[in-house]
């Protein structure tokens, strides 16, 4: 595709993804209630071989520097015996690599020391409760919480950057303040929240209600304002950009506070947070403000080579066994439509924030079957704020790009 034509037709589209998430295996011993991969108890014969994994890395190199980040996930990523060789190959080619292993017996000191030796840039671990009963019941693996906390101590001892991830559901949403304090004590460089999206094994019965989601967005804004560690929303978090801007404009006196709808959940979480913060000596972590200009959203490569817009949006856009990743990314009509607000439907097509939000496409697809439909759980009504406000004027000021928050 001609680069000039590509960029001029859709100014919201970039020529490379910020990251390539690779599901290196579908195998996992755990039985997580929300598993988007619908992981299996045995390895799949369709997994990429070691050589094919090297070829995937070669295809990432075709995007040229600065390269997309390689994010290795699973299943249980440490279940692959060749994973250390694969990481080393990527690191030898100057690619930043992170890994998100499961908290099983594979997450032991020997394997963590191997990750350190091959130069892993960060380890991301999932935590779904501040106590064992909450985490283990959600993960379906007795002893997972103990394995997790022991591994975190080893990771900190080895000096490997640690990121912790939480899937927010009806089961644990009321404990977010306790989890924030707990994650801070674990010396994580960042806490990343995923709103449950009914994909794979994830049941819609655990998904939050629309007002509850809005309340979580506002609660996360409060956590960010504490300025003690990085906090962000990943899956289902696109509308958080709108909330972030609106809250900033309220602080600046540009908007009145009544443009935000604060629900009972937000009031409950905020009250509990203020109490815990007053009782706790929170650790101050350096918050790195990394600007990654010129990148679009990440893309997802499944264990069998199929490529999707994300791990939560199971619409195939190609297969690296049949085409180059660079070509798949640059020629995908689906990625074009997702990235350009003119294709959105319903109230997302009318919203004054659609140049930076677009609603959650994965949630729209999971609930309606149409990835371009309006976000079915967004409570914002387009036109609530004056359209005379120039959104672009605040983007750089607040550290927001079309795809990636950089604060």
Image (spheres, rainbow, N blue to C red):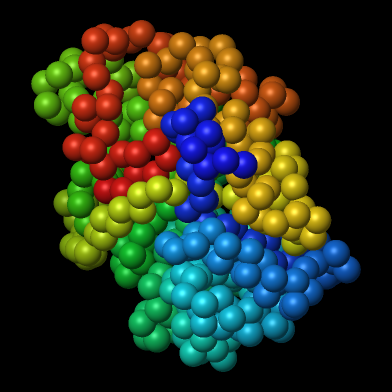
Q: Nearer the viewer, residue 218 or 366?
A: 366
Residue 61 higher or lower than 18, as above or below: below
Residue 150, visible in the rendered structure: no
Drawn side of residue 155 relative to residue 371, left or right: left
Drawn side of residue 184 relative to residue 138, left or right: left
Residue 128 image offset from top left, x and y in percent? 52, 55
Q: Nearer the viewer, residue 47 or 196?
A: 47
Q: Residue furthest right?
A: 45
Drawn side of residue 383 relative to residue 324, left or right: left
Residue 249 image offset from top left, x and y in percent? 19, 25
What residue is at 52 percent from the left and 19 percent from the top? 342
Q: Residue furthest left?
A: 253
Looking at the figure, which quarter contains the N terminus? top right
Q: Quadrant of residue 362?
A: top right
What residue is at 63 percent from the left and 79 percent from the top? 86
Residue 142 higher or lower than 120, as above or below: above
Residue 74 image offset from top left, x and y in percent? 67, 63
Residue 148, visible in the rendered structure: yes
Residue 349 higher or lower than 193, as above or below: above
């Amino acid at each position: 595709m001609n680069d000039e034509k590509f960029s001029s037709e859709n100014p919201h589209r970039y020529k490379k993804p910020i990251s390539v998430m690779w599901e290196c295996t579908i195998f996992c011993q755990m039985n997580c209630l929300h598993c988007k991969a619908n992981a299996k108890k045995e390895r799949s014969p369709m997994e990429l071989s070691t050589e094919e994994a090297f070829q995937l890395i070669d295809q990432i190199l075709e995007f040229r520097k600065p390269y997309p980040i390689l994010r290795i996930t699973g299943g249980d990523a440490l279940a692959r015996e060749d994973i250390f060789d694969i990481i080393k190959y990527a690191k030898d080619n100057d690619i930043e690599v992170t890994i998100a292993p499961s908290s099983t017996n594979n997450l032991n000191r020997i394997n963590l020391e191997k990750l350190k030796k091959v130069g892993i840039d960060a380890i991301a671990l999932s935590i779904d409760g501040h106590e064992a009963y909450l985490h283990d019941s959600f993960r379906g693996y007795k002893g997972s919480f103990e394995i997790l906390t022991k591994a975190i101590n080893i990771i900190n001892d080895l000096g490997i950057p640690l990121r912790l991830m939480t899937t927010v559901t009806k089961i644990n949403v009321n404990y977010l303040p306790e989890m924030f304090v707990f994650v801070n004590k674990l010396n994580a460089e960042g806490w990343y929240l995923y709103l449950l999206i009914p994909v794979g094994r994830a049941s819609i019965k655990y998904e939050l209600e629309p007002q509850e989601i809005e309340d979580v967005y506002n609660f996360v804004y409060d956590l960010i304002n504490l300025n003690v560690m990085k906090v962000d929303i990943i899956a289902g978090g696109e509308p958080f950009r709108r909330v972030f801007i609106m809250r900033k404009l309220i602080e600046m006196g540009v908007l009145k506070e009544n443009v935000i709808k604060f629900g009972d959940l937000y009031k409950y979480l905020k009250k509990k947070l203020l109490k815990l913060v007053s009782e706790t000596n929170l650790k101050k972590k350096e918050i790195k403000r990394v600007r990654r200009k010129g990148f679009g959203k990440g893309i997802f490569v499944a264990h069998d080579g199929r490529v999707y817009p994300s791990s939560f949006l199971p619409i195939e856009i190609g297969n690296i066994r049949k085409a180059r990743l660079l070509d798949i990314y640059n020629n995908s009509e689906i990625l074009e439509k997702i990235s350009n607000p003119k294709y959105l439907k319903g109230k997302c097509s009318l919203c004054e924030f659609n140049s930076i939000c677009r609603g959650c496409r994965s949630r729209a697809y999971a609930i309606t079957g149409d990835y371009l439909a309006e976000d079915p759980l967004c409570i914002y009504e387009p036109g609530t704020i004056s359209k005379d406000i120039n959104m672009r004027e605040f983007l750089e000021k607040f550290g927001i790009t079309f795809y990636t928050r950089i604060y």
